[in-house]
Image (tube, rainbow, N blue to C red):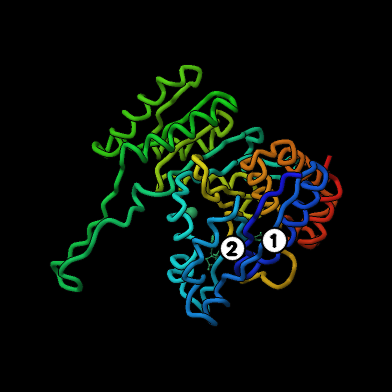
Amino acid sequence: MKTYKIAVIPGDGIGTEVIEAGWMVLEAAAERYGFSLAATTFPWSCDYYLEHGRMMPEDGIETLRRFDSILLGAVGWPQRVPDSVSLHGLLLPIRKAFDLYVNARPHRLLDGVVGPLRAENFDILCIRENTEGEYSGAGGRIHVGTPDEVAVETSVFTRKGVERVLRYGFEQARRRKGKLASVTKSNAQKHSMVFWDEVTDLVAADYPDVAVTHYHIDAIAARFVMQPDSLDVVVASNLFGDILTDIGAAIQGGLGFAPSANINPSGGVPSMFEPVHGSAPDIAGRGSANPLATIWSGALMLDHLGEEAAATSIVDAMSRFTRNGAMRSPDQGGTAGTIDIARAIASDLS
Ligand code: NAI
Ligand code: MG
């Protein structure tokens, strides 16, 4: 039987609760589809930091490298550890070390979920460049604190970086409806974004079966709200993708539903799957978090590992669950607990 080695990092707050729920569904899917998941759980979190002075051990990255995938809950507890420490001590080093250059987030309404829009039939896969662009960290400040102070933050776009994320987008468009939206602001940013447009056209030549549209970020932000059903795959830079995916999470019913995948498509390193939401200290410890974002992230992990049928079965069971509507988590106006929801979905896999 095929066994996948999964590094599980529950993290902080509701991270531990939604991971327990997500894992229950993943194990049920594995059993049903004839493969096995071997989990090793790592306690790396803000608690770990307070005890050890670091978010993960010095050889944490090397430890993770041996796994097929990483499943992460959420990290952060701002009252006790500054977010800059928790984020830079765990999540960002993992993304960087394994060059997880694709951040992929599906945005669609599960059956029966009421979003804020009139449109219901949208199905967007947003792909955000995850390693460079506006978040490259290149820059500095001089004359700090004086009237002559200067702050410079430089976007970095490389041919390799832009081309590889677009290529991934085109591959996904081929598996879906065959449409790709390339997002820039090339009317105003005449160097980096014109470059992005050029690389888009170059890569597009290899995918004559995919219909490409160039959008400016402001126009596509409006389109996410007004005509989300006109979009399929959307590829954007780090900053633009960051903003668009928050709109995407909002229109799909909120953070309780939004899953994400941090992927290195060339393989050889573990990719990382996590809900978009954080550790939600305001509701942590009550067993009331909505686990659907994590369960969906687990399905994205199985799909990436090549277990497409099991992944589809999880998403289908989630859709039946939300369509039925009898059980809802508190963020959806109900009273169902995190584990009860997971149990209902795990027992209804087809
Ligand atoms: P958050 O996503 O944790 O919470 C925002 C709001 O959404 C809260 O009211 C929360 O109760 C609610 N919420 C989030 N997930 C939910 C779920 N599954 N079910 C029901 N309600 C849910 O964002 P916040 O409060 O800004 O950040 C809290 C901590 O999480 C911070 O330390 C932050 O840095 C960290 N964080 C970590 C992320 C990660 O690990 N990838 C992502 C975002 C934030
Ligand atoms: Mg964001």
Mark 1: few/some/many CA within 10 Å (<14, 14-19, 20+) = many
**Residue 176 on image: x %, y %:** 60, 27
Residue beneath the point at 59% across and 63% down: 74
Residue contact at pointers 2 and 1, CB within 8 angstroms: yes
Q: Give how far across and how far down residue 272 sits, in percent.
A: 56, 52
Residue most toward the left? Answer: 148
Closer to us: 192 or 56: 56
- Name which residue type carries label 1: Val
Q: Is residue 211 left or right of residue 69?
A: left
Q: Which residue is mark 2?
A: 74
| Quadrant for the N terminus in the image | top right
**Rendered residue at 52%/38% (across/down):** 224
State the quadrant of the C terminus: top right
The verdict on label 2 being within 8 Å of ligand 1 is yes
Camera-nearest residue between 162 and 269: 269
Q: Secondary structure at mark 1?
A: helix
Identify the amino acid type marked 2. Ala
Q: Is mark 1 within 8 Å of ligand 1?
A: yes
Q: Is residue 7 above or below residue 79?
A: above
Question: From where the camera sits, is residue 133 visible?
Answer: yes
